[in-house]
Image: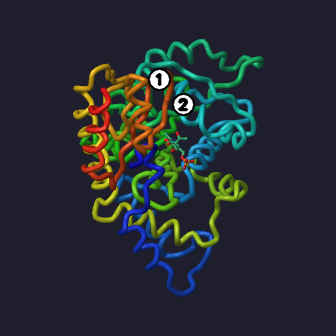
Amino acid sequence: MNFCSDNATGVSPEIMAATAAANCGAVMSYGDDEYTQRLQVKFSDLFETSVTVFPVATGSAANALALAVVTPPYGAVYCHAESHINLDECGAPEFFTGGAKLVTVTGNHGKIEAETLGKILDRAGAGVVHHVQPAAVSITQATEAGTVYNPAEISHISEVVRSHNLHLHMDGARFANAVASLGCSPADITWRAGVDILSFGATKNGAMAAEAVVFFNQELAKTFPFYRKRSGHLFSKMRFLSAQLEAYITDDLWLKNAVHANNMAARLAAGLAGVEGAKFCHQVEANEIFIQLPESVITAVLAEGFLFYRWDECTVRLVTAFNTLEADVIAFVEAVKRHQ
Ligand SMILES: Cc1ncc(COP(=O)(O)O)c(C=O)c1O
Ligand SMILES: C[C@@H](O)[C@H](N)C(=O)O
């Protein structure tokens, strides 16, 4: 039983079927196909405003290319110290921006606080030739700590971003899990809250390999095609990414998958709450659990064949997904309780 990551899962049957169904005949390439064209309307409907959508294959590409559009080589991107763009993308944002600097911001439970960000930006040296120039802020929704920003928190951050003439990017690798957790509309935690560009994740939540860069700020969308092409992410057979994304947002599949993943995480957290020596590091608000367990328990449960990542000293990360079985959750809890 694998609780390592939602990246470990397979593909939603609906998405696999849609991808196979797209494999018929010849269609125009490089995004000029009907599947990709339909995405523009369908994503605009989903977000209740006119958007421009660009499929790419990975979340790291979505993040790095989106940031490249809003950050000059001498610029600065402000992000949480534990953010994926800072720790897990091998310098892709720095590379694709042409050398911009990621300036990290600390904050509890994986979240940037507007007041802290404002103080940092007030002292950032905008216009001072010796300093990198503030250009963008990137927040992750749901965060790398398994928490979520509510609409008001995002609005407060975007007010600070706007007051310093910057742009706001959202790493939404687990965006669906955040929407499912908050019970809000996609618009409420994006453009209505001041987000300019969203990396809309699908791979972790049922797609095979498809993410969408969604532009709410249409002016910023103009240069993205060139960044995407020169990064090698302009797929000639784009239909096979777009077919995944289209199936993902059809009949609310994206939300149904996320609701299940979140429910399994809540079920797992409830089971672990009573374990002797267990201590949750963060509120479980989406599909990731960070929990401290006695080393003897961790070692014994790993020895039983359960798969999960150690996160740091005595802390493990448990991630549920759209196809996590409740029986697996129960089995994991029982294994932990056997060894407590
Ligand atoms: C929060 C977050 N953002 C972005 C990514 C990048 O996605 P990918 O691994 O597809 O590059 C991940 C990866 O799992 C992630 O957890
Ligand atoms: C790199 C690793 O953290 C991946 N992003 C995950 O969430 O599993």
Task: Mark 2 and ligand 1: say if the CB distance to the nearest ligand atom is below 8 Å.
Answer: no
Above or below, comparing residue 53 to residue 68 in the picture: below
Circle 1 packing at 10 Å, graded few (<14), some (14-19), many (20+), is many
User: x%, y% of residue 144?
Assistant: 46, 34
In the image: residue 190, left or right of residue 117? left
Residue 32 left/right relative to 49: right
Q: Considering depth in this image, is 283 or 197 the residue closer to the camera?
A: 283
Which amino acid, by three-letter code, is at mark 2? Answer: Val
Q: How many marks?
A: 2
Residue at 41% x, 25% y: name it.
Answer: 296
Q: Position of residue 270 (x, y in %)?
A: 22, 33
Q: Residue at x 32, y 51 (%)?
A: 324
Left or right of residue 153: residue 107: right
State the SS at label 2. strand
Foreground of the two, 178 or 127: 178
Residue in view at x 48 percent, y 39 percent: 170
Relative depth, front residue between 20 and 67: 20
Q: Nearer the viewer, mark 2 or mark 1?
A: 2
Residue behind mark 1 = 160
Out of 201 and 165, give the one closest to the viewer: 201
Residue drawn 57% across and 69% down?
238
* N-term-proximal mark, 2 vs 1: 2
Q: Residue furthest bottom?
A: 25
Q: How far apart are labels 2 and 1 at the CA level? A: 10 Å
Q: Which mark identifies residue 197?
A: none
Q: Are marks 2 and 1 in contact (CB under 8 Å)?
A: yes
Residue occupied by mark 2: 137
What residue type is disc 1 on?
Answer: Val
